[in-house]
Image (spheres, coloured by chain):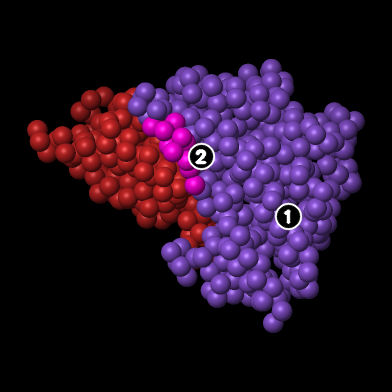
Chain colours: A purple, B red
């Protein structure tokens, strides 16, 4: 089935006339590189988050790389990361010459890095722990903050999924030495390619800005951002709260419907939804052998696109070749059972019902 | 940097309106156009720094290796391919007088900042399809399928087969680069 036949895509990006006018304004002013609009967006985002600094960069991968470097991660060090995340969370440690060490998740209902497992992995070479706020729901960064402080190591937050999410009222991204946000197309706040590092630490912000610059400007990586994308994000930031509210309402509706389907599990609790930016809607099938056929049937028979967030990183060829087989049973169970169903702010009730009915029908067979 | 014309602004804004912003058909069209100009394979990346990094990865340059950096004088020829003992990487600076040009180096890179007047973007140029494929893989996390393929139902999942990066360019910038490249060609035709 092609896109045109897809009745319900996994995500859909719809920009407003105001968003488009903001982009056109930046282009008309010739701000094709880093100019005043980038600075203005950084100020706006920092204020929205309640962080001292925001440094806009070319991607979340770049933000993670700079966050690790600024935390002092270097050759020979270890960074503890979850395996249920995008590969960049671990790759950014490799860019620093460090080794990613994989921690398991808490379980199928809490697919977040497990602080108890993290504690057993901390050793003399551990320099940092990276907590991923999976699907926009808070990982246990309060407990991890205490744990990292006890061991004198850094906590970095991978907030790619989680703008406008909180733990006990405190914005995600403000618990660690730095937070790394993503503005990739399918994200909650998106502009195509883009990312941002936030921090309260003046020195970390200074280092991140210096490393972000191009080599010819005395920088290193050329992770710079530009005016049109900054203008778009500034415009979209104004609608973020409404977008997240729409996502939360859709997630509550999914949760009520999916609760009655045999063979299907729904992670997180109802009360977690109000603290999440609800980036995606993950569900887990009880029987992993049904996952592949379910995804195929949803696409081919019902025009419903799904995804898998995520295949466990430790099982990718590149990581198996480097580190051999690793035993992370709960991450494995998640990767074998998870299905991500469509979610975006303007997903209509009819489309959502189509997804719900398709899942119910296929699992009833 | 060159301020976009109203036509260019309209093309970029239209791309944003369509809503597909991740590397897709626009980037592929830009690669075809560059590949046509230089009679080779072109892979577009986020920056010229990224292009050079990926070239060094393709050549297997590691931490113990040395790379000789030389400035080539105007009109000076590179040693012929047979005379070389090591791969030669060339920075293409005179792109784009709009006319087809042959590459002297084994691999080349260029920046969209100069000739196209953009704020970012660059490309890797190579005669080798295999090297071009490796660049394409490494610029997007060495994943076996991209967002475009998965969105269009061609792939269900992916593997990660190497240490890759996010060095992708995006569609709106590719649309602008392509418009500028076409304009450059048209100006030369007129002259």
CB under 8 Å between discs 1 and 2: no
Total marks in image: 2
Decide if residue B172 is on the left or right side of residue A15: left
A287 up-or-down from A56: above or below: below
- Residue B146 or residue A265, whichever sits in front: A265
> Residue at left 64%, top 47%?
A246
Residue A37 position within the rendered picture, expressed as x and y whole percent measured from the top left? 49, 23
Residue drawn at x 55%, y 41% is A190
Residue B88 in the image: x percent, y percent? 36, 39
Instruction: Look at the image and say whether residue A20 sits in the magenta stretch.
Output: yes
Q: Residues within 10 Å of mark 2 (few under 14, many from 20)?
A: many
> Which chain is home to disc 2?
A
Q: Tell me what residue is drawn at x 73 percent, y 44 percent.
A: A276
Q: Please state if A166 lies on the left or on the right of B20 as rendered.
A: right
Q: Chain of mark 1?
A: A
Q: In the picture provided, is B73 more to the left or to the right than A45? A: left
Residue that mark 1 sits on = A252
Please provide percent x and percent y for residue B109: 36, 38
Vertically, is A39 above or below B135? above
Q: Residue furthest bottom?
A: A365
Name the element at disc 2: loop
Circle 1 SS class: helix
Nearer-the-camera pick, A320 or A364: A364
The boundaries of the magenta stretch are: A14-24
Disc 2 target residue: A191
Chain-order first, disc 1 or disc 2:
2
* Res B52 visible: no
On residue B112, the disc is none
């Amino acid at each position: 089935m092609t896109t045109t036949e897809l009745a319900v895509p996994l995500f859909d990006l719809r920009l407003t006339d105001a968003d488009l006018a903001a982009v056109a304004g930046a282009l008309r002013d010739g701000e094709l590189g880093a100019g005043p609009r980038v600075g203005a967006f950084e100020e706006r985002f920092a204020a929205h988050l309640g962080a001292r600094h925001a440094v806009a960069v070319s991607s979340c991968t770049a933000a993670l790389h700079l966050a690790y470097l600024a935390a002092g991660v270097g050759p020979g060090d270890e960074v503890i990361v979850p395996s249920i995340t995008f590969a960049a969370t671990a790759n950014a440690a490799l860019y620093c010459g460090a080794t990613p060490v994989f921690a398991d998740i808490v379980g199928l209902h809490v697919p977040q890095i497990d602080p108890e497992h993290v504690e057993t992995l901390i050793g003399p070479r551990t320099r940092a722990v990276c907590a991923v706020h999976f699907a926009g729901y808070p990982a246990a960064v309060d407990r991890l903050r205490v744990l990292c402080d006890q061991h004198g190591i850094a906590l970095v937050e991978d907030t790619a999924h989680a703008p406008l999410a909180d733990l006990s009222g405190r914005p995600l991204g403000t618990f660690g030495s730095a937070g790394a946000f993503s503005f990739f197309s399918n994200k909650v706040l998106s502009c195509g390619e883009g990312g941002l590092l936030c921090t309260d630490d003046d020195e970390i912000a200074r280092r991140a800005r210096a490393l972000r610059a191009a080599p010819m400007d005395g920088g290193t990586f050329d992770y710079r951002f530009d005016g049109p994308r900054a203008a778009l994000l500034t415009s979209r930031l104004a609608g973020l709260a409404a977008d997240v509210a729409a996502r939360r309402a859709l997630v509550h509706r999914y949760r009520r419907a999916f609760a009655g389907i045999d063979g299907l599990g729904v992670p997180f609790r109802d009360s977690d939804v109000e603290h999440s930016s609800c980036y995606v809607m993950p569900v887990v099938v009880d029987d992993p052998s049904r996952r592949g056929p379910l995804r195929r049937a949803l696409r081919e028979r019902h025009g419903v696109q799904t995804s898998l967030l995520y295949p466990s990183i430790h099982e990718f060829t590149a990581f198996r070749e480097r580190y051999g087989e690793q035993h992370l049973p709960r991450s494995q169970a998640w990767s074998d059972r998870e299905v991500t169903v469509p979610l975006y702010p303007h997903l209509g009730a009819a489309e959502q019902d189509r997804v719900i009915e398709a899942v119910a029908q296929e699992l009833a067979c | 940097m060159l301020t976009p014309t109203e036509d260019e602004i309209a093309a970029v804004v239209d791309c944003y309106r369509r809503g597909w912003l991740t590397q897709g058909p626009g980037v592929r069209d830009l690669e075809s156009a560059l590949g046509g100009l230089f009679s080779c394979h072109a892979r577009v990346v986020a920056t010229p720094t990224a292009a050079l990094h990926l070239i060094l990865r393709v050549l297997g340059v590691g931490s113990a290796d040395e790379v000789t950096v030389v400035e080539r004088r105007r009109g000076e020829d590179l040693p012929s391919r047979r005379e070389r003992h090591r791969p030669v990487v060339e920075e293409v600076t005179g792109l784009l007088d709009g006319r087809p040009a042959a590459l002297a180096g084994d691999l080349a890179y260029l920046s969209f900042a100069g000739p196209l007047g953009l704020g970012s973007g660059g490309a890797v140029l190579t005669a080798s399809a295999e090297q071009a494929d490796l660049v394409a893989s490494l610029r997007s996390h060495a994943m076996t399928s991209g967002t475009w393929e998965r969105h269009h139902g061609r792939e269900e999942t992916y593997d990660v087969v190497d240490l890759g990066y996010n060095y992708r360019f995006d569609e709106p910038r590719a649309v602008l680069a392509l418009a500028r490249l076409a304009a450059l060609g048209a100006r030369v035709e007129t002259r």
